[in-house]
Image (cartoon, helix red, strand yellow):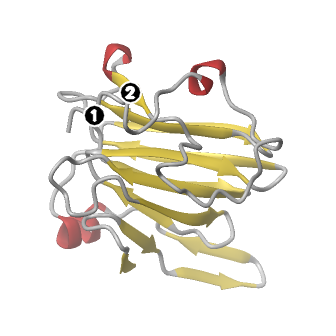
Amino acid sequence: MKVLETSIKDLFIIEPRVFGDDRGYFFEPYNQTVFNDIFGHIQWVQDNESKSKFGVVRGLHFQKPPFAQTKLVRCIVGEVFDVAVDCRKGSPTFGQSFGVNLSGENKRQLLIPKGFAHGFAVLSPEAIFAYKVDNVYNAPSEGGIFWNDPALNIQWPLDLVQANLSPKDLILETFKNSDLPF
């Protein structure tokens, strides 16, 4: 596994070793021993998966403490533009975002620590997105930031007409007005 640093401390792109031939491919999306050697022990407690069609934007979401979550995210089928926003007050990169294309083809993953808002936009006709979390979901602890807040200046590869959001995501607060608990 290859670990790539990003422009934001503690946020990493993970590129697995893929073994392919004319029959297909094999790779380990997660190996606890290797992962622990690099990042220390993270106790994953839940796996989540979603299927979405082109233009769907999910996020930007976070869980408030004590239910804050570290996430290990990947796109199994299709392609997404995945975004993490640093919401850690006192961080030198507070309010900055990082985006990366994750796809079934590149098999990249993004490790997102607690204190970040997370979301993605589907770029392919459909996408299957999966992620591990180290804390259970808790509805009252849910928070979020409006996906297209101009203050964040996220360079989404979709225009406003293409974006398909849930009613819940359409009414999220701006970064400045969000109740950021980190």
Classify 10 Å Cα crowding around label 2: few (below 14), some (14-19), many (20 and above). some
Residue in the picture at 15% in, 52% down? 90
Residue 73 in view (yes/no):
no
Classify 10 Å Cα crowding around label 1: few (below 14), some (14-19), many (20 and above). some
User: Depth check: 150 or 32 in front?
Assistant: 150
Which of the two discs, 1 and 2, sits closer to the camera? 1
Q: On the picture, is 3 further left or further right than 90?
A: right
Q: Determine which of the numbered discs, if any, sits on residue 143 in the image.
A: 2
Q: Quadrant of the N terminus?
A: bottom left
- Seen in the picture, residue 65 relative to 21 is either above or below; the reply is above
Q: On the picture, is 46 further left or further right than 92?
A: right
**What amino acid is at disc 1?**
Leu
Q: Position of residue 30 (x, y in %)?
A: 40, 61
Residue 50 in view (yes/no):
yes
Q: Which residue is mark 1?
A: 180
Residue in the picture at 26% in, 46% down? 114
Helix, strand or loop status at disc 2: strand
User: Depth check: 150 or 165 in front?
Assistant: 150
Quadrant of the rendered structure where residue 35 is? bottom left
Of pointers 1 and 2, the one earlier in the residue sequence: 2
Q: Position of residue 96 (x, y in %)?
A: 38, 59
